[in-house]
Amino acid sequence: METKNEPDFANEPEFAPVYRGREAGATLQILQRIDQALQAQRGHLMPWIPVALGLGIGWFFLLRKDPGILTWSLLALAAIVALPFTQRGDARAFVAWAVVLIGMGFAAAGGRCALVQAPVLSFRYYGPVEGRLIKVDRSSNGAVRLTLDQVRLARVEPEDRPARIRLSLTQMKDPPEVGATIATTAHLMPPQGPSEPGGFDFRRYAWFQKIGANGYTRAPVVVLAPAQSGLYLPRFRSQLSQAVQQRLGPETGGFAAAIIAGDRAGVEPEELQALRVSNLAHLLAISGLHMGLLTGFVFAVLRFLLCLIPKIALRWNVKKIAASTALVVGLLYLGISGGSVSTERAFIMVLVLFVAILLDRRALTLRAVAVAATLVLLRRPETLLSPGFQMSFAATTALVAVFGWIRIQQPELGPAWLRPLLTVLLSSAVAGAATAPFGAAHFHVLSHYGLLGNVLAVPVMGLVVVPAAVLSLCLAPFGIEQIGVFFLHIGLEWILMVAAWVAAFPNAQSGVVMPGPWVLPLFTFGALLILLWQGGFRWAGLLLMGASLMLWGQATRPLVLVAANGGLVGVITPEGRALSRANSQGYTARNWLAADGGGDTQAEAAQRWEAQVKKKVFLVAGRRIIHITGKRQAQELRTCQPTDLVISNTSMKAEGVLEPEGGCEVWGKERLRRSGSLMMGGDGQMVSAADLAGNRPWSRP
């Protein structure tokens, strides 16, 4: 006798033994529920496609070594076996699609990794550097930074030269024109690993950007040849940025150049800091907000104007004409802004939305978001690990889901005159709540008044700044762009004033401890389960999110951190982290202190070190930490104890330097070059960045 509501696959011969006998009743009920739950997702499979792709991409980047022939063969075999089951009408189709898509994401990441392969400098270089300038931006400390291709280095063979290098300038404020061939004398080094084991790995980022070396120069930059041909869009961007900054002046010119041409080099450090503290820094990056406001403004205005002309409105589909025009404008904006990853991601989203309009489909749906995410992941799989991708799609997914629910349920949102304000408040709150965990995890800060800043600034961006920018660009050929520039200046001044006002609030920003490696994936999967799953099981996502937040709350920081070159040591004390040096290794020190969740400066942390120890010695987890800098201190250290940990930024094999006697653990310059940064946990054992990174193309010495 057959059990009622038996799943389809229960009657097939290969599964029949599972269902024979009364003893299988409990198992059958569980399988029935699983089958019904998975079958309910078949009609909603599209939103899960980027999730499965992301699992495959994440799997690829988690590996400690490159996948071998066996891994690729098993992956291909699994896909071949799973493909026939994708046509089934039961739960196996959902599982089969998951296997296929995870394998596809894994393969996309592997293919992308191979396609961007380029030479990486393998030693520290000092000497003449020549190359073509392709990009100008600013580093984290505000220094002008140049990216060069067609690189020439003395004593380096052509096949070993990096495809691109990046140089920070310590003196120059007005860089040469993009496209010019320049020369200087510079210090170069291979891209550096994470400032602490498990932290952000710049080597991986540089690998996918084809940046094979980075460094700095204090020498003058000489223009060998002006820009002649090629790089038309970057050159146009540079000229547009300079024109915008000249028109608007130093107060708002840098901000305007950032949102129009994607050039953030002109933004003053004080303005940038205020925008970050007030949670308005996203207005600088050309992303979904800018692309959406621009194309939405063009779409709405053009559709309205065409409707005023009866001959056109009655004979043509003005909605599709406006959508096509807005799409072209978005494509032009993508080119003008430099085509960064965030802008490309935003354009793909806009492309999906307007194509949906052209096909008479609903534009703002989770399916549209899924299509955009899928295209981005297949084109640039490495963006899955970037905060831009995570925060952008977190905000978009949350907004579409919430406003989709409002459209269906139609709750009362107050009187008509108040609804626009409530809509702005709701959208800012939803986007802020969706992106806050990702921003806190990546940047280790949380803005307390970000909602207030966004409510006061974002409407001005949409109602004043974007229309004024479009108007000024349209009027520029006629020489009367000053009309638009006037309103653009007023709008940007308001946003900067709001940023400075909010940033001046007491405790406007607080630090957040860096979470463990599984906190963010667990939180993300829980949120996606709530938003995408069909059925009551979706609320299990709350448990996953709660578990991730509990893990985050229990996160602990390493007792000891060591810089990759041995030049800085940080030790946890009851008052906070103590640093061995007050001035050197500023970038590493800022990262350590931010990840600790504190707001201390390097100077304050160095005072703790000097206050608690003499001769730079610490006792941690039963081990004495000895940090020596320079050859003289290395020569003076003759003896040590077996439990001592000696850190040196000097070669322990240099002339006149001998390793201390006593059997202590010594990390000198040569050993640290192989291991990268170090950390010590509560057990007193040292873990290196190389241990966690493994042997991947971007991490090989």
Image (cartoon, grey):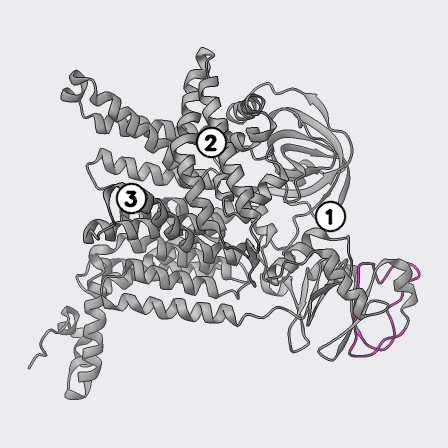
Where on the picture, by quarter, is residue 700? bottom right
Instruction: Residue type at mark 3: give it.
Output: Leu
Left or right: where 132 falls relative to 519: right
> Where does residue 44 sit, x and y in percent of width and height?
23, 55
* Circle 1 SS class: loop
User: Is 646 part of what is drawn in magenta?
Assistant: yes
Residue where numbered disc 2 is placed: 491
Q: CA separation, marks 3 and 1? A: 63 Å
Quarter that holds the N terminus: bottom left
Q: In the image shown, does 134 or 17 lie closer to the viewer?
A: 134
Left or right: where 376 falls relative to 26: right
Eye-nearest disc, 1 or 2: 2
Residue where numbered disc 1 is placed: 123
Instruction: Residue type at mark 2: give it.
Output: Gly
- The number of callouts visible is 3
Majority secondary structure of the magenta segment?
Answer: loop
Q: Is residue 115 above or below residue 134?
A: below
Q: Is residue 292 at least partly visible in the picture? A: yes
Q: Is residue 135 above or below residue 693?
A: above
Q: Identify the residue at horizontal 25%, vertical 50% (top origin).
A: 413
Highlighted magenta segment, given as a residue range: 639-664
Q: Identify the residue at horizontal 45%, vertical 60% (top origin).
A: 59
Contact? badges 3 and 1 (CB < 8 Å): no
Contact? badges 1 and 2 (CB < 8 Å): no
Residue where numbered disc 3 is placed: 418
Left or right: where 245 falls relative to 634: left
Q: Residues within 10 Å of mark 2 (few under 14, many from 20)?
A: many
Mark nearer the N terminus (2 vs 3): 3
Mark nearer the N terminus (1 vs 2): 1
